[in-house]
Amino acid sequence: MRVVIDALPLLIRSAGVKNYLYHWITHLRRAAGPDTIGTFPPLGDIGPLRHQASVVGPWRTATGLAELLLSNHTPLPVLDILTRDADIFHASVMVRRPPRRPLLTTTLHDMTCWLMPELHPNSNLRDARASADLLRRAGRLIAVSACTKMDAVRVLGIAPDKITVIHSGISPAFFDCDASAIQKVRGRYALKRPFVLSIGTIEPRKNLATLLSAYQALPPSLREEFELVVAGPIGWADSSTKARLAEIRYLGYIPESDIAPLTAAAAVFAYPSLYEGFGFPVAQAMAAGVPVVTSNISALPEISGDAALLVDPRSQTELRNTMARLLLSPDLRADLTARGRARAAQFRWETCAAKSLEFFQNVAASV
């Protein structure tokens, strides 16, 4: 069996999908070998994960993106040639004309563009519409959560028996954060007080405005003891939300190597997102032993289980009261820390890779 995975998001600025592909491909290759797991474009050794830049050198990045353009916008059979030895082609979000001979599979990450189009720029919506045909054409699909599967069945009409749920994994860095790395990241960002942390692109779906208001509504004594720290690149948030970042400690984009120790340094992780297909930041915080407050909708209850406090993300009052309850109770924080670590242990990339290989073997055997 030979599987070729569309790895093009590794060459561009990307967040969740890039994180998934980077660790997924790495662990699939580790489990099955590069002869079984190939990529489009062909990638040899992959460098460190960087969300803002390509994980390979400039030449391989340029030629890979050129191959994509030729494949998507010309009649040249680029992908048919480059995947001629593949039994399965696993598409991501950028290929529009998959190769004709291999079996076609793909991964469903979330359905937010279909369910909440008002929260996205037109470019995102165009990409989602373009990918809908690919999703329907795929013979089999992986969904990163049961919630994502149900949404795809309901919204796109995909047959449920075509979709296999395989939860994503968490980087090992979050399970074992070195104390010295935590101290260094505190010093690097001048984090002298305990803090509530939220990480993610600054965009409407992350619901940062509600978090800011809930934090500002906390008693002054709690705000004096715990500051609110937000990290993540500026996306397409409205101007008022961007302006309000001056009210708290906004770190902007931080490199991948700092995310695990920064997360582990937090007293509480707050993530009132309006929709997540999996919710990497929540799973990562649990792995790092940080008590979590998150939303009671989309995939977040599925991923957090009984290891987080769940709130209505549109209720500022409920979010404020729950954060206050957690910040005022060291015993509750300790309980959630233990529950979170146990819950996060279910989301290992080794497990995800093993289940994915079984998925591909079943696809190949179905012919």
Image (cartoon, rainbow, N blue to C red):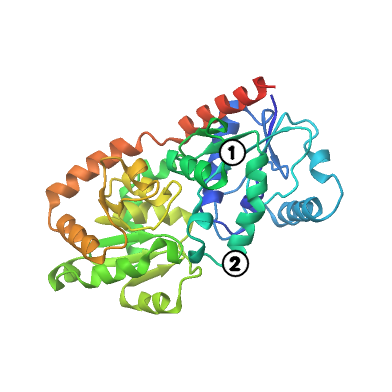
Quadrant occupied by the N terminus: top right
Q: Nearer the viewer, residue 137 or 47?
A: 137
The answer to whether 46 is drawn above or below residue 215 in the figure is: above
Write the residue at 63% across / 46% down. 92
Q: Quadrant of the C terminus?
A: top right
Crowd class of label 2 (few under 14; some 14 to 19; many from 20; radius 10 Å) = few
Residue 243 place in picture, x, y as percent: 40, 79
Q: Is residue 34 left or right of residue 112?
A: right
Q: Amino acid at mark 1?
A: Ile
- Residue type highlighted by circle 2: Asn
Residue 27 spot, x, y in % from top left:
54, 34
Work out whether residue 225 can be spotted: yes
Residue at mark 1 to residue at mark 2: CA–CA distance: 30 Å
Residue at left offset 48%, top offset 59%: 116
Q: Secondary structure at mark 2?
A: helix
Q: Secondary structure at mark 1?
A: helix
Left or right, 191 with respect to 54, comes to left
Vertical comparison of 336 with 233: above or below? above
Q: Is residue 117 above or below residue 135?
A: below
Closer to the N terminus: mark 1 or mark 2? 1
Residue 295 at x, y = what percent?
32, 53
Depth-wise, is mark 1 or mark 2 nearer the camera?
2
For the point 46% across and 48% down, which residue is it?
277
- The image's mark for residue 25 is 1
Question: Residue 46: percent from the left, percent from the top?
Answer: 62, 45
Q: Which residue is mark 2?
A: 122
- The 10 Å Cα crowd at callout 1, few under 14, some 14 to 19, many 20 or more, is many
Is 336 on the left or on the right of 67, as rendered?
left
